[in-house]
Image (cartoon, rainbow, N blue to C red):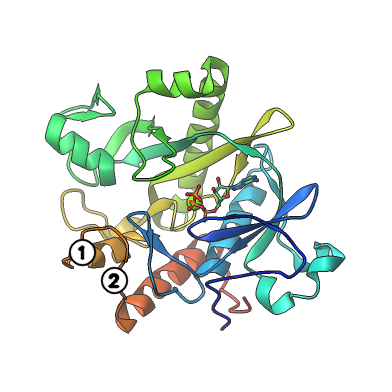
Amino acid sequence: MNIITDLELPGIPKVRSGKVRELFDLGDRLLMVATDRVSAYDCILPDPIPGKGEILNRLSAFWFQRFPHVPSHFLTADLDEFPEELQAYPETLRGRSMLVRKAEPLPVECVVRGYLAGSAWREYRERGTLAGDPLPPGLELGSPLPTPLFSPATKAQSGHDENIPWKRFVELVGTEAADKLHDLSVGLYSDANSYAALHGIIIADTKFEFGLIDGEIALIDECLTPDSSRFWPADEHRPGSRLISLDKQFLRDYLDTLDWDKTPPAPQLPPEIIEKTAARYREIFELLTGTRVTGNA
Ligand SMILES: Nc1ncnc2c1ncn2[C@@H]1O[C@H](COP(=O)(O)OP(=O)(O)OP(=O)(O)O)[C@@H](O)[C@H]1O
Ligand SMILES: [Mg+2]
């Protein structure tokens, strides 16, 4: 398997290097390449997760194509449809890259929560609220919420993203866009969760990013991947007890056992943690798509 952590494509300008993805400028479009880098607590870890880039890219492509009614940046993930200048890099690009339309990213993260976990659980445990709004009493870690909740966050340039109340969200994007982002996000989450349920998976929560393309709101970045979502096996799910996760939570749980202050440099991972993380990414991909990872990328 071809493991990629850093990437240059001679002659093709790079516009952005995120924690996981590299974006290249193709003039009117972008090439988005998912590396095998993994981040946790906003730090890039020194070890890659083999196969991860391909899984993120193919799972995002799968969801973008499942939701043709939602405008998105997705054009194609088929190497044969890539422009001539990219045909020189089949080993590097196959499976892990897609062509997308250029967008102006909105400065918010559109989180939808169907279940109580992560930062929402921490706030609820301390104050009984989510972004300041009260939730019903008696919920446990992993409890379903009465209805899926839109739970936006800021897209912090540095430091951790922060959950924000609806009022702040409206200030950041405007009333009209706020309503649209809410409806699109909750609709996408609900459709995806219904689909996942048929495959024995709960989508506990997920984060969408949107941008403006020709002035219109469109879904961008990645979609419903194990980096952006919490996936739980439905048959083993018991609120209040230890949660089994088919996503990045396994890695966070391991990191929480270490004496690491969550600032760079991040610690190296033992081989068995790398392999178990990779196995979880493969498993969720195969359960959701019904296809195996090719290992081509
Ligand atoms: N169609 C698009 N047009 C422009 N930018 C995009 C598009 N899709 C995704 N992006 C941006 O590309 C980056 C994707 O890379 P990645 O997910 O690795 O970054 P990140 O580390 O999560 O984010 P950041 O670099 O903003 O901290 C994000 O900054 C995302 O907002
Ligand atoms: Mg990202």
Q: Vertically, is 213 above or below 242? A: above
Q: Residue at x 44, y 74 (%)?
A: 48
**In the image, residue 29 lies at what x, y percent?**
76, 49
Question: Disc 1 and disc 2: Cα gap in Å?
Answer: 8 Å
Q: Residue at x 36, y 41 (%)?
A: 161
Q: Which residue is mark 1?
A: 260
Quarter of the figure with the C terminus: bottom right
Q: Is residue 133 above or below residue 270?
A: above
- Secondary element at image label 2: loop
Residue 174 image point, x, y percent? 53, 18
- Label 2 CB less than 8 angstroms from ligand 1: no
Query: Which of the 4 image quadrants contains residue 84?
Result: bottom right
Q: The residue tagged with tag 1: helix, strand or loop?
A: loop
Asked if residue 94 can be seen in this view, the reply is no
Mark 1 residue type: Trp
Could you tell me residue 281's position as x and y percent? 44, 67
Residue density around tag 1, few if under 14, some if 14–19, many if 20 or more, within 10 Å = few
Which of the two residues, 121 or 44, is positioned nearer the viewer here?
A: 44
99 relative position to 36: left or right: right
Q: Which mark is residue 267?
A: 2
* Number of marks in the rendered image: 2
Q: As displayed, is residue 164 above or below residue 33?
A: above
Q: Position of residue 96 (x, y in %)?
A: 62, 67
Question: Are the residues at dot 1 and dot 2 in contact (C-beta closer than 8 Å)?
Answer: yes
- Judged left or right of residue 232, residue 227 is right
Towards the viewer: 118 or 7 = 7
Residue under the point 38% across and 67% down: 45
Quadrant position of the N terminus in the picture? bottom right
Q: Earlier in the sequence, mark 1 or mark 2?
A: 1
Q: Can residue 200 be spotted in the picture?
A: yes
The quadrant in which residue 254 appears is bottom left
